[in-house]
Amino acid sequence: DDDDDDDSNAASGEVGSGSKRKVADMDGDKFPRQAPRVAKEKKPKSLFFSSFFYAILRNAKGGYSYDNVKRWCRKVRLPDYDYVFFPINVANTHWTLAVVEPKNNVMRYLDSLGGRSPQCLGLLETFLQDEGRARGFESMTGPWVKEQVGPSTGPRI
């Protein structure tokens, strides 16, 4: 019977070709066929916006219009995400990234050239507060912690 293959080389660490392959340690004790399952680490839930989102948000008459972008979130609940990413094109010459943590009310502006953009974070904060009010996400309607992240040294433009 193929299911009861005798692995004569099991003690040496070699595994036979039967359907029930067994591995033995140096004393000949049999190990379980499967290793115990390790709990999978929970991966952060992330949402990535198109680079057009920020351009549309910013380019409204008066510099901001929630109405221009409110449809972008109608199928998602921002507070359910660990991270929300907003790519930002700066003057068609450089890319930066805004990363929002809706569960912690924290937003970061990341610029590899060390640039700062309080305007960008201000617009995103206003959008998130408006989204919170419009969709009943009370946790999003208050103030947000804003951080500028970039290299400590390097070229400055």
Image: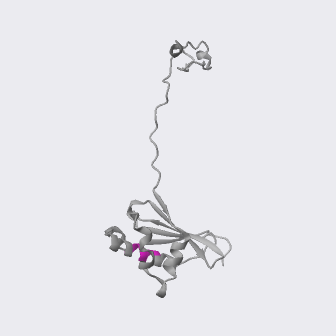
- Mark yes or no: residue 143 visible: no
> Which residues are drawn in magenta?
124-129
> For the C terminus, which image quadrant?
bottom right
Name the residue at 68% across, 74% down.
155
Q: Residue furthest bottom?
A: 62
Image location (x, y in percent) of residue 87: 55, 69
Secondary structure mostly seen in the magenta stretch: helix
Place of residue 110 in the rendered image (x, y in percent of width and height, measured from the top left)? 56, 69
Residue 111 in the image: state x and y as whole percent: 59, 71
The residue sitting at 46% across, 55% down in the picture is 44
Residue at the image position 49 percent from the left and 30 percent from the top: 35
The location of residue 53, given as percent across then percent down, is 51, 73
Q: Is residue 11 above or below residue 40?
A: above
- Compared to residue 49, the image places residue 127 above or below, namely below
Q: Nearer the viewer, residue 22 or 118?
A: 22
Answer with left or right where residue 105 lies relative to residue 136: right
Q: Which of 109/60 is in front?
A: 60
